[in-house]
Image (cartoon, rainbow, N blue to C red):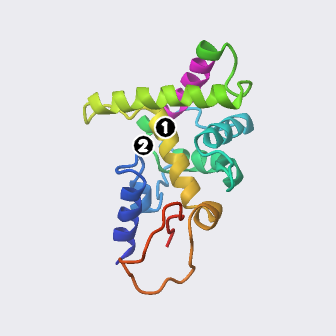
Amino acid sequence: MNRREALSSVALLLGGTIVGAEAFLSGCTNTDKNIGAAGLNFSPNDISFLDEVGETIIPTTSTPGAKATQIGEFMQRIVADCYEPRDQQVFLDGMKKLEEASRKKNGKSFLSASAQERHDLLVDLDKEQKEYMSKKKPEDPSHYFRLMKELTLWGYFTSEIGATKALRYIAVPGKYEGCIPYTKGDRAWAT
């Protein structure tokens, strides 16, 4: 299996088509400094905000959560280096929309909301994005929350923490054996 096939398989495992999936195949080779949305500089507050969004999506349990993987840094890097300008703008606008949705639903900022309030908000946004994605035309942009969720899953499960703590990992796997018994509750394999 070559790199392209392996990365395509990972994309399928993460839920199908990922916006920015070309990053898998091209290695984020956008070198044109003119590419990107205006004002694409993420502040430390933006990265902290994205860390908290990621931690709400994949919270710390018996394994470390998304925040432990510095998911905000990962998101900003992929958005800045790999996303098309249209998707960059959707992502940036989405950060503002998520904050507005929190203020509307909870009467406070996302960062000031309790863990349960954040969870409930993101469940609502997930329902909204699923409905939007089921009705959108191919030329329409993806929903902002879908971008955030996909980046969280991608960043977490390809990080050292995600691959070794949440999944089972063997650095140099042997041959493929498709008939290994699986016991309910076992972690999936990262390799």
Q: Pointer 1: residues within 10 angstroms few (<14), some, or many (20+)?
A: many
Residue at position x 67%, y 42% in the image: 51
| Residue 173 lies within the magenta run | no
Task: Report the Cα–Cα distance between label 2 and label 1.
Answer: 6 Å
| Residue 101 lies within the magenta run | yes
The residue under label 2 is which amino acid type?
Answer: Glu
Q: Which mark is residue 109?
A: none
Badges 2 and 1: C-beta atoms under 8 Å apart?
yes
Q: In this view of the protein, which residue sits in the foreground, 173 or 26?
A: 173
Q: Classify mark 1: helix, strand or loop.
A: helix
Picture quarter containing residue 109?
Answer: top right
Q: Pointer 2: residues within 10 angstroms few (<14), some, or many (20+)?
A: some
Residue 66 location in percent, x, y?
64, 49
Which residue in the structure is indicated by mark 2?
84
| Total numbered circles | 2
Residue 47 location in percent, x, y?
68, 40
Residue at position x 34%, y 78% in the image: 1
Q: Is residue 140 left or right of residue 96?
A: left
Residue 125 location in percent, x, y?
49, 27
Q: Which mark is residue 88?
A: 1
Q: In this view of the protein, which residue sits in the foreground, 105 or 4?
A: 105
Residue at position x 44%, y 56% in the image: 23
Q: Is residue 102 left or right of residue 21?
A: right
Q: Classify mark 2: helix, strand or loop.
A: loop
Does 49 appear above or below 124?
below
Most common SS among magenta residues: helix
| Residues shaded magenta | 88-102
Residue 140 location in percent, x, y?
31, 31
